[in-house]
Image (tube, helix red, strand yellow):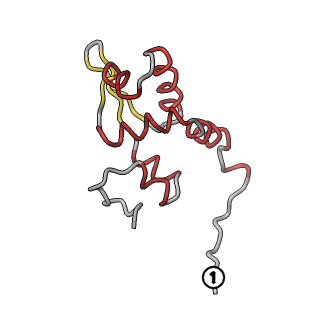
Amino acid sequence: MIKELPLATVTNENVDFVKYEAKFKALADQKRLQIMYELTQKGSVCVCDLVNIVDMPQSKLSYHLKILLDAGLVSRDTRGTWSYYELNHAEVNRLLSPELCCIFRKRDDHSSGCCS
C-alpha cells in the first residue's frame, strides 16, 4: 500500500511559475545539460577552457551559460578578464528528482542525501 503524503498548501498566489518555467526551460536543452555535467565533474571552470571541453564556439557557449545563470543553475565568478562558472548544486538538488540529480553529482559526494 502506498502511503500518501499530505500536500503543502500551494496556491497560484504563492508560487512563482515564471521562475520555475525559466529553470525547466534551461534544463530542457541537451547542450546545457552537457555543460552542467562538465561543471559537475570539473568544478569551477574558466569559460576559455569550457569552450574546448564542450566543443562549442564561445558565442554559443556564452548564450547557454547566460540561460543557466539567469535560471540560477550556475554561478559565475569573474577573476580579472576571465569568468569561471560552477554548478549551483543546491538549486539543482532542489529541482531534480534523485535519479536526475545523481547525474550532476560528483561520484564521491553524497552529503546532501540526493543519491541513495
- Asked if residue 93 is positioned above or below residue 59 in the image, the reply reads below
Which residue is painted at 65% across and 40% down in the image? 21
Quick check: 104 left or right of 28? left
Residue that sits furthest to the right in the current view: 12
Which residue is painted at 32% across and 50% down in the image? 106
Residue that sits furthest to the front in the current view: 55
Q: Residues within 10 Å of mark 1 (few under 14, many from 20)?
A: few
Which residue is painted at 54% across and 36% down in the image? 30
Q: Kindly state the secondary structure of the residue where label 1 is placed.
A: loop
- Asked if residue 5 is positioned above or below residue 33 in the image, the reply reads below
Q: In x, y percent, where is residue 7?
A: 65, 69
- Asked if residue 114 is positioned above or below residue 42 in the image, the reply reads below
Q: Where does the C terminus fall, quadrant-wise?
A: bottom left
In front of the other: 59 or 53: 53
Quick check: 14 left or right of 30? right
Residue that sits furthest to the bottom in the current view: 1
Q: In x, y percent, where is residue 11?
A: 72, 55
- Asked if residue 91 is positioned above or below residue 116 in the image, the reply reads above
Q: In x, y percent, where is residue 12?
A: 74, 50
Name which residue type carries label 1: Ile
For residue 43, which quarter of the picture?
top left
Which residue is painted at 52% across and 53% down in the image? 96
Check disc 1 and report the residue beneath it: 2
Quick check: 43 left or right of 37? left
Q: In x, y percent, where is residue 33?
A: 49, 39
In front of the other: 18 or 112: 112
